[in-house]
């Protein structure tokens, strides 16, 4: 394998590994944020439904 190819591959790997690591971390954080946002929206809907139904049970 020529030295030029080895250098090109090593620079490519040195550049790609941090980028792939950061992409994976961002993907994980985005997934966690979406899950939290979805849970918050579902809790808000549940609270609204509870407030709508609670007066009917009290009467």
Image: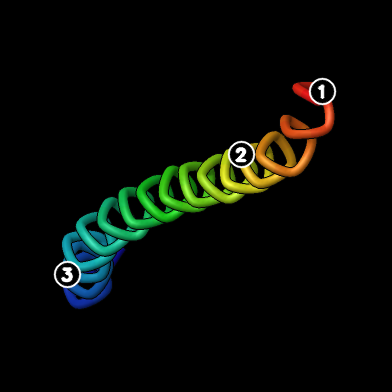
Question: How far across and how far down the image is residue 45, in percent?
Answer: 67, 47
- The residue that mark 3 highlights is 11
- The residue that mark 1 highlights is 57
Q: How many marks?
A: 3
**In the rendered view, does 30 fall on the left or right side of 6?**
right
- The residue that mark 2 highlights is 47
Q: Residues within 10 Å of mark 2 (few under 14, many from 20)?
A: few
Q: Residues within 10 Å of mark 1 (few under 14, many from 20)?
A: few
Given residues 39 and 17, the one toward you in this image is 39
Residue 5 figure quarter: bottom left
User: Is the C terminus in the top left, top right, bottom left or bottom right quadrant?
Assistant: top right
Residue drawn at point x = 58 percent, y = 39 percent: 43
User: Is the N terminus in the top left, top right, bottom left or bottom right quadrant?
Assistant: bottom left
Residue drawn at point x = 17 percent, y = 69 percent: 11
Given residues 4 and 34, the one toward you in this image is 34
Question: How far across and how far down the image is residue 31, in percent?
Answer: 49, 48
Question: How far across and how far down the image is residue 36, in percent?
Answer: 46, 43
Given residues 41 and 8, the one toward you in this image is 41
Q: CA distance from mark 1 to mark 3?
A: 69 Å
């Amino acid at each position: 394998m020529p030295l030029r190819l080895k250098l090109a591959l090593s620079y490519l790997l040195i550049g790609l590994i941090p980028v792939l690591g950061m992409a994976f971390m961002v993907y994980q954080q985005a997934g966690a944020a979406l899950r939290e946002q979805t849970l918050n929206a579902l809790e808000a809907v549940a609270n609204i439904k509870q407030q709508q139904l609670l007066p009917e049970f009290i009467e």
